[in-house]
Image (spheres, rainbow, N blue to C red):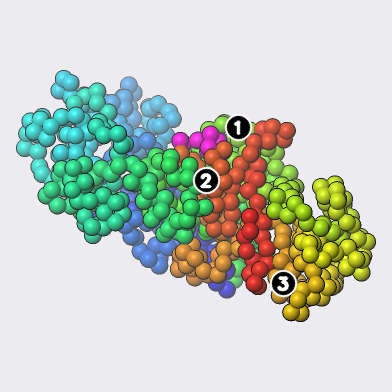
Amino acid sequence: MRKILLLLSILIGIPLLAQTKQHISYTVKEGDTLENIAKVYRLSPNDIKSLNPALAEKGLQKGMILLLPGEEVSYFNKKQPSGFQTHEVKDKETLYGLAQKYGVTQDDLRRYNIVLYKKELRKGQELTIPVYKEAAKEITKGKEGLTKYVVKPGEGIWRIAQNYGITQEALEKLNPNLPNPLKEGMEIWVPAGVTGVPQVTTDKALVLYQVEKGEGFMSLERKFGLSQKELEKLNPELKDGIKLEAQIWIPKSNFLDYVATAGLSQIGMANNTDANPKVKAGMQPANTKRVSFVLPFRVNSIQAGNIADIKGKLQKERMTAVAADFYSGALVALDSLQKMGFSLTVNVYDSNGSVQGVKAISSSEALKNSQVIIGPFAPSAFNALSEVITDDNTAILAPLSNKNIELRPNVFQTVPTIEVQQNSMISFIYQKYPDANIILLSDAKSKDMNEKLQSSFLQAKSVDNIQGIQSALVKGATNIVFVSSDDVVFLSDVIRILYNTAGISAKNKNYNIIMATLDKGEAYDHNSISNSQLSALKFTYPAANRYAGETNTFISKYFKTYKISPSKYAFRGFDLTMDAVLRTSLNGNFLKEANIGETSYQENKFQYIKNPSKGGGYENRAVYILRYEDLQISEIY
């Protein structure tokens, strides 16, 4: 029942995503209300509620990431309109003239009339005009050599003066009667032709950090390793104390250390294998990452009918369930990244699980402008999308399939192929057990696998039946017995005979045996297969993903959010989304960072290698070698 409730909560707002509409993310700020957000984005509060089911349970909270229907715009006026009026465009009217007439900026007009980003004004067009309590002003040059600057949240006079290379006194002279503290959204005069980026005088680059509620010098020292004296040297205004949500300068190296350790530990990724050193050294959280999901929610086929009907359809629609699971894990990753300081623009599309569904959304400009696209699931739908979006600034990630993916130059097959997994296992045995006695055994249906092993291990002994195993074993040597079969009865007999022959239950073992396979099929999960005997035989095999365990930070966070344990697809959604954003954060281009090496997360790891022979795309070559040990499955390579 909880599984169905999860699916309903994920899918409840998907009807808006099913067509070609774009969606953006919005981070709730202090003082925001649902009504104000709705006004700014020209929505109704119900529009927002339908896309964000968590609002019904938790209400609007600062820091919450909301999914909003609409197009991303390039300008955001911090002032909130108190209302709106309409204007019918007359002949020869211009955007500049209308902005002057109504006391707003041209960007305000574009923001509330999205069509103006793409088309010119036309006679008879009806425009929505925002009404402010105080008229907004166009940010243009005014006094000679000066330009207007809009104050950001938490900025002080000293900070802005430093950014523009002048003293605080000089800035105050440019702006008589300047209030202290400054108010967010107010406009002040600053020198023109200066970028506003601080001129760093040390050999360390700085990043701007917004102080969280309740943070003092001690907590900042624990977080960034900087003493109060060091912080005050970088930020002289701190000598008067730390103000709520003030923005302060932190050396980039200290900030990245925090993000890659303390920040990552919040989601269970603090150890060195999870925070790839190259990612840690180069990621840039502040730059906005544009990520799109194209998933087979199939909302159109589900939304009709009452709740009982919908639940019944959800139980039958396996791909919808998988998509919801995957996306639920991705949402946890996006939330974690947001808390780590990453700026994200997220778009979600319903592919309807078909080529036709993909074609319906492939013309979306937001989709084309994504830095990373995750999905679709099905190879046919995925290939249809990658055929259209070929820009090398956009990486398209195949999230679940490792078959029939057309490896175009901007395509990433994120699941290692069966061949890659098998070759990794063979290489592992070569490196770890160069002197082992290799024995090959298969049932009648798996002779091809035996032939592959025989060509890889030329000295291997191939036995025709189970009874021939003992004669092939060597005492005092490491005997690796490769078993190729997915037949439950056959496997059960082999495991029992190997266990008894090895004499594991006796005080002195007769033989040192490691049971192995290149392909661990579903038969190994059958009730008649003894896990204790597999553990005693150190059963070893390759896999695309590992077992994360019963409890860790991600599992706890997921359960707290959804009241259900994450499935393997939720893990996959989390890991792939996390890796995609972290790689993109290095320089804004996923493809350019394909060769940074291996990165590892909860249940999945990634190491992309370009394959020129298959179209120039990339394959994930990161494979786990797993082993049953002490009644647990351990990662040994």
- The extreme front residue here reads 476
Q: Is residue 105 visible?
A: no
Disc 1 or disc 2, which is closer to the eye? 2
> Magenta span has 588?
yes
| Residue 71 pos. (x, y %) | 44, 41
Residue type for callout 1:
Thr
Mark 3 surroundings: few (<14), some (14-19) or many (≥20) residues within 10 A: many
Quarter placement of the N terminus: bottom right
**Image quarter for residue 383?**
top right
Query: Is the residue 27 above or below the residue 316 in the image?
Result: above
Residue depicted at x 78% and y 56%: 436
Sequence-first tag of 1 and 2:
1
Of callouts 2 and 3, the N-terminal one: 3
Name above or below for residue 309 compared with residue 187. below
Q: Nearer the viewer, mark 2 or mark 3?
A: 3
The residues tagged by marks 1 and 2 sit, at their Cα atoms, a distance apart of: 18 Å
Q: Which mark is residue 390?
A: 1
Residue 56 vs residue 181, the one in the foreground? 181
Residue 152 image offset from top left, x and y in percent = 24, 42
Report the side of 87 relative to 587 (left or right).
Answer: left
Badge 3 amino acid: Ala
Magenta residues, as a range? Answer: 587-594
Q: SS for tag 1?
A: loop
Of 608 and 30, nearer the camera is 608
Q: Quadrant of residue 191?
A: top left
The residue sitting at 33% across, 51% down in the picture is: 37
Tags 1 and 2 touching, CB below 8 Å: no
Q: Which mark is residue 536?
A: 3
Which residue, given by chain and number where applicable, does mark 2 sit on?
580
Which amino acid type is shown beneath numbered disc 2? Ala
